[in-house]
Image (spheres, grey):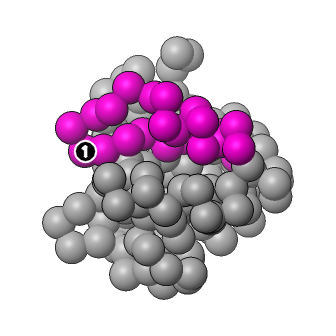
Amino acid sequence: MPDALFNDKFSPPSPAALAAGLGKTLALWTALADLAALAGGMGEWKFYGAKYGWQFKVVRGKRSLLYLIPGPGKFTAAMALDREAVGRLDGSGLPREVVVAIRSAKKAPEGQPARVEVTGKKEEAIARKLVEVKVGRQV
């Protein structure tokens, strides 16, 4: 994995730096962050080391809801799905290949990992649907 877009431990991304780094995907980032807030999440920047850099972590209560990981001109939306959320994947309308990838991923202690690299509206819609699957309702 290449070094993160923002890897200076002492400088979380400013809004201007985030906009410059994400480019055209900034609006999609903002839409997902807003969706997570509507689902009851609170976001904050967290530093995960030089290799992973700064990530925007959204928590709901004491549990992680969503990670937004900036990259050059794109970002990754990542989350862990518990057993109930994985059970909701079948009726979710998500593309079959996404469901298969999530179900076949190595399970983590937090749940089944789900990651979407967002480069456009199609991927943002998949990430949006995954957040809704995770919280168990349409947001």
Nearer to us in this view, 76 or 100: 100
Does residue 69 show up?
no
Nearer to us in this view, 104 or 28: 104
Q: Could you say which quadrant of the image residue 57 lies in?
A: bottom left
Left or right: where does residue 110 sit relative to residue 15? Answer: left
Nearer to us in this view, 112 or 41: 112
Left or right: where does residue 61 sit relative to residue 70? Answer: left
Q: Could you say which quadrant of the image residue 26 lies in?
A: bottom right
Q: How many marks?
A: 1
Q: Which amino acid, by three-letter code, is at mark 1? A: Glu
- Residue 103: percent from left, percent from top: 49, 37
Residue, far left? 62
Q: Give the vertical position of 30 relative to 100 (above or below).
A: below
- Residue 123: percent from left, percent from top: 74, 50
- Residue 11: percent from left, percent from top: 39, 44
Query: The C terminus lies in which quarter of the figure?
Result: bottom right
The residue tagged 1 is 110
**Dot 1: within a 10 Å radius of its alpha carbon, few (fewer than 14), some, or many (20 or more) residues?**
few
Q: Could you say which quadrant of the image residue 30 lies in?
A: bottom right
Q: Give the vertical position of 31 relative to 94 (above or below).
A: below
Write the residue at 35% across / 73% down: 42
Write the residue at 28% across / 34% down: 108
Question: Circle 1 sits in a helix, a strand or a loop, which is it?
Answer: loop
Q: Residue 100: within the magenta?
A: yes
Q: Which residues are magenta?
A: 96-118
